[in-house]
Amino acid sequence: MEHAAQSPLIEAMQPFTTTIFSEMSALAARLGAVNLGQGFPDEQGPDALVEAACKAIRDGHNQYAPGTGIPQLREAISEHQQRFYGLDLDPAREVLVTVGATEAVAAAILALVSPGDEVVTFAPYFDSYPVMTARAGGILRTCPLSFPDGDFDRERLAAIFSDRTRLVILNTPHNPTGKVFSRDEMEFIAELALRHDAWILTDEVYEHLILDEAEHIPMACLGQVADRTLTVSSAGKTFSMTGWKVGWVSGPAAAVAAVTAVKQFLTFTASGPFQYAVAEGLRQPVQAYSELASRLRRRRDFLRDSLQGLGLATNNPAATYFLLADFGPLGVSDAAAQMPEFAERVGVVGIPVSAFHLPPPEAYVQPLVRLAFCKRDEVLQEAMRRLGTVSGAPLGS
Ligand code: PMP
Ligand code: GLN
C-alpha cells in the first residue's frame, strides 16, 4: 500500500496544497475566533440582485449558459466599461464571462505562458498568480511594495524585466495593500511591458471599492498598451456576492479568444442564473456602486484608528477590503509561524502577509498581518476588544 500512501500530486503543485485563505478560515472556525482573514463580506448583497437571481432560476435559466457567457451579461460588461472608463468593447468578441476572477486569471496565464517564460508582478500578490504561473512552467519575478506606503523602486522593477518576460500581472486596486496605482506608476509599468513586448494581465476586481479620493485607472485606458492588455474583474467584490463566482475578462479579440480556448476546457460555463442577476446589477445607477464603498470607508477608519490606538503601525488603504498591520507590538515577530497560536490565545485570525511573497520573505514582511474590514461593525468591535487584551509579551513566553 506504499503507493497509495504517497501523494500523487505533481511536483509543480506540491508547494500549494491548501490556500492560505482556506487554512485561516478553517483555523477561525475550529477556534471560534473572529475571522478577519479571508476577504468576504458578512452581509447580504443588494436585494435587487437576490431577487433577479431567484427570478432567473424560476424563469428556467437552469441549463448550460453559452460558454462565453450570456449575451445580456457580455453587453452589460461592455456598457459598464464604456460608462465608467470610456472603453469601447465588442461584447461578442472582446468580453468573456468566467467563473469568478480566479478562473479568468488561471485561464489567461495558462493561455499566455509557456515553460521558461517569465511573469512579472508585485509582492505581496494575490495567491493564485504564482500557482498558475508555476503550473504553466513559468517563472515568477516579483518587485516588493514597501510598508506602509506601498511604494516600489522603479529601478528594481525595471531590473526584473528581461527578454524572457512574457506577462506582467498588475493588480489595481491591490490586494492585500489596498494601493491604487497612480497614472504615473502605471505609465512606467506600461512602458516596460511595451519595451519588452510583454502582455499585461490587469486584475481590477476592487475597481469599485475605492475608499478615498484616489482614482482607479484601468490599464486598458493607457492607449499605448490597450492592444496587449487583458482586464479582469468580478461581481463578487462589486456586489458583495463572492459565492456567485461571476467574473469576466475583456481585451483584444485575439487575446480573449486565446483565454476562451483554455476556459472552455476548465469549466466550459457556470453560474448561469447568477449571470442574469449580474447583468442587471451592472446597469444600476452610479450611486448604487458607491454605497458599499462608503460603508467600507467607515469600517477601514475604525479598524485603522483602533489599531493605531494600540500602538500598531498600519497602512492606510485607499481601496479594497484590506488593511495591513504590524503585529510586532502584540508579540508577533513571524506571523506565518505564530498565527495559529495567536488565534488560539487572542481569538482573532488575520492572514500573514508573508503568504503573498516568494519564500523566504524579507524581514519587514514577517510581522505583517492582513485584516479584512468587510465585516459588520460589531464583528470589528469584538476583534478590537480581543486585540486590546493582548499584553504584548512574546508568544510562547
Ligand atoms: N483577484 C484578486 C486580487 C482577489 O482579491 C480575488 C479574491 N477575491 C480574486 C482575484 C478572485 O476573485 P473571484 O472570487 O471572483 O474568483
Ligand atoms: N480574494 C479573497 C481574499 O483575498 C479570497 C479568495 C479565495 O479564498 N480564493 O481574501
Image (spheres, grey):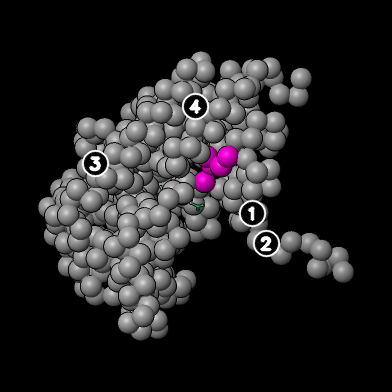
Mark 1 element type: loop
Whether the residues at callouts 4 and 3 have beta carbons within 8 Å, the answer is: no
Of the image marks 4 and 2, the number of the one nearer the N terminus: 2
Q: From the viewer's perspective, is the residue at label 4 or at label 3 nearer?
A: 4
**Residue 7 visible here:** yes
Q: Amino acid at mark 2?
A: Leu
Depicted 332 relative to depicted 79: above or below:
above
Nearer the camera: disc 4 or disc 1: 4
Label 3 sits on residue? 216
Q: Which residue is mark 4?
A: 325
What separation in Å lies between label 4 and label 2 (alpha carbons)? Answer: 35 Å
Q: Which residue is mark 2?
A: 9
Residue at the disc numbered 1 = 17
Q: Indicate the secondary structure of the residue bearing disc 2.
A: loop
Circle 3 residues within 10 Å: few <14, some 14–19, many ≥20: many
Would you call the spot at circle 2 few (<14 residues within 10 Å), some (14-19), or many (20 or more)? few
Q: Earlier in the sequence, mark 2 or mark 1?
A: 2
The part of the image, by quadrant, that contains residue 151 is top left
Of residue 103 and residue 71, the one placed in the foreground of this image is 71
Q: Position of residue 326 (x, y in %)?
A: 52, 24
Mark nearest the camera among 2 and 1 is: 1
The amino acid sitting under disc 4 is Ala
Q: Is mark 3 within 8 Å of ligand 1?
A: no
Q: Are marks 2 and 1 in contact (CB under 8 Å)?
A: yes
Residue 271: where, in percent of width, then height? 40, 71
- Residue 231, given in percent of the width and then of the height, sits at 29, 54
CA gap between label 1 and label 3 equals: 34 Å
